[in-house]
Image: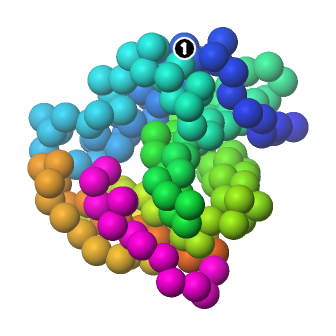
Amino acid sequence: MITIEKASVADASEILAINKRSFLMYRDALPDKNIPVAALGETEEEARGDIETNHVYVARIQKKIIGSIRFALLSSELAYIYKFGVDPDVNNNGVGTDLIGRAISDCAELRIKAIALHTNSKYYRLARYYYGKGFYVHSTDASKGYIRALFVKELSDQAYDLSPAFKH
C-alpha cells in the first residue's frame, strides 16, 4: 500500500536518489543530452533546505521512498510544483497520481488560485499526464536550452498573477 506523507530532513538522501533516477529519464527525453538538468545537480543540502522551507511529500511502500513532489508558494495565490519524480521501477502504478493529488488538495486547502509547473514540451508522456490532471499549457520558452511548457492548473475562477512562475 502506498502512503503519502510530509518529508522529513532524514528523507533527503532517498529523495535525491529517486530524483536522480527519474530525472535521468527526463534528460534522456531532451533533444540534446548535454543540456544541464538542474535536478540532476542537486545536493543533499539543497534537498534538506527544500524540506525545511517548502512543501515536500514522499510516497512510500512500507518504509521505502518511491517518489516525491515539491511545491513552493510563489505568492498568496500561486503555487509552483518542481522536482516531482517517481522511481522508474514503479512508474504507471498511481504513485505520481497520489503525489500530485496531495499537492493539489493542499493547495486547494490553502486557497491557492492556480498551480504552475514547467516540463519539456516534447516529452509527450509527461505532457499528456499533466493534461490528464487538469493542467493546460499557458506558454513555452527555450531559456533552459530546450522548449519548456509552462503548465497551469486553475483551482479558482478568480484572477491570479502568473508572473512569478516565469522566473523558474
Q: Residues within 10 Å of mark 1 (few under 14, many from 20)?
A: some
In the picture, measured across the screen, residue 148 lies left or right of residue 20, that is: left
User: Residue at point 46% right, 40% down?
Assistant: 83
- Examine the rendered structure and indicate whether residue 117 appears above or below residue 139: above
Residue drawn at 19 percent across, 35 percent down? 36
What type is the residue that disc 1 sits on? Answer: Ser
- 153, 33: nearer the viewer: 153
Q: Residue at x 29, y 61 (%)?
A: 166
Report x, y in % for residue 16. 49, 22
Q: Which residue is mark 1?
A: 13
What residue range appears in magenta? 156-168
Residue 125 seen in this snapshot = no
Outermost right residue: 1
Residue occupying the far front of the picture:
76
Residue 75 on the magenta span: no
Q: Quadrant of residue 87?
A: top right
